[in-house]
Each structure stands twice: as C-alpha cells, then as structure tokens.
Image (cartoon, rainbow, N blue to C red):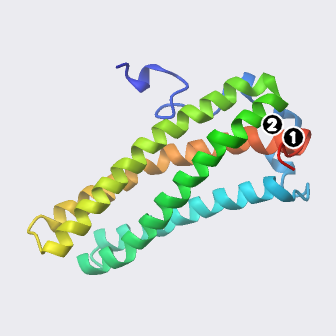
Amino acid sequence: MSDPADDPLSLAVRTGLPVEMRYLLDAFPRERWPTAGMAGTAAFWLQMHAGFRAQQVRMQAVTDQWRSGRIDLRQLHGGLLPLLQNFLGHLDGHHRIESGQYFPAFSRMEPRIEAGLALLDKDHDAIHAHLEALYRNGLAFHQAMAAGATGTTDAAARLAEVLDQAAAPLARHLDDEEEIVIPLMALRGDPHG
C-alpha cells in the first residue's frame, strides 16, 4: 500500500485544491457567497458544514477542559461521548448522500469537474478511516469507564489524540468540497431541484 503522503492531492498533505479544480470558484468566489442570497441545497450544504465545524469545536473544548484539569474523566465521558456519537452519525450519513447521490449528479451536470468530485469522494474514504478510529477509541473509553478500569485515563488520552488527528483533514475537506460544490450549484443549479 502506498503512503498517502506520496500523493500531493492526498487529504493528509494537500493545502488546497489544484488550479484545474478551481475554475468554478474563480467564476463564483467565496467572497460572493454571503451576498448571493443562496437558498435551497447550497445554503443547506453550508449549514451542514458549519454544523460539523461547530461540533468539532465543542468536542475540542471538552477535551481541552479535561487536559487542563478543569473537568474529570466522568465529566469528559458525559460531555464528549454524546457529541462524538452525534458527530459520527451525521458526518457518515452526509458523506453517503454526497457520494451516492450528489457527486454522480454533479458529474453529469459538469463533466469538467469530475476529477474534483473523484478527489472529494476519495477524501470520504480517508475521513471514514478517522471516523472508524474515533468510534473505536470512543468505545474503548466508554468501556473503560463502565468497567472502572485502571487504563481509563489512557483510553481518554487516546480518544483526545485521535480527535486532534481528525480535525485538520476534515477541515481541509470541508473547505475544498465547498469550493467545488457551492460554485457549481450557484452557477449550474441544484441537480435535484
């Protein structure tokens, strides 16, 4: 298996979309989005992404409180795991709809952007690996808490670390996806609308 760092478009290393995938963004730049009065699916898409970002901030705040000693393991468990469960379920469902319904429809609408959509779909696979790691480590922390295990602090620390590791790739993906999808819908319309 090749190292994702060897691919300059890998979610693990890229810092933005390549020029050839930004032509729609050039036609409808991010600065125009707030004033465009977007409605329907484009507005909903941005709201969903804002929600994922907000969930990440809330989860990070809870882990930061624990790391700084302001809350204990019990409070971390009660504060973080419901947020994590909600985040995992919503993000997984969102990606399934995008990959299964929207990306194929967008590709038919705008064949030139197919490589960009394929990149976003590949991102979903990379993010899914992070979601799986978050699930496994969240479950391990929960089981350790329930059993009163001596390794509970280590399980909490591993979960916090995996949460940290997932943050940057997800942020990169959300930004890049918006820079393809929002201009596409603004310029070509909603494929399901």
Q: Nearer the viewer, residue 169 or 42?
A: 42
Q: Amino acid at mark 2?
A: Leu
Query: In the rendered view, would you say 86 is above or below 111?
Result: below
Mark number, residue 28 = 1
Q: Residues within 10 Å of mark 1 (few under 14, many from 20)?
A: some
Point 83% across, 33% down: residue: 24
Residue 65 in which image quadrant: bottom left
Choose top left, top right, bottom left or bottom right for residue 100. top right
Residue at the (57%, 65%) spot, across then down: 54
Please, is residue 102 above or below residue 39 in the view?
above
Would you identify the image quadrant in which residue 49 lies? bottom right
User: x and y percent of residue 51 in the render?
Assistant: 62, 64
Report the residue at 43% width, 65% height from top: 85
Q: Dividing the image into 4 quarters, which one contains the N terminus?
A: top left
Instruction: Left or right? Give the position of 70 relative to 33.
Output: left
Work out how far the residue at label 2 is from the one at label 1, CA to CA, in angstroms. 5 Å
Do labels 2 and 1 touch, CB within 8 Å?
Answer: yes
**39 lies left or right of 1:** right
Q: How many marks?
A: 2
Q: Is residue 15 visible?
A: no
Q: Which residue is mark 2?
A: 25
Amino acid marked by disc 1: Phe
Q: Secondary structure at mark 2?
A: helix
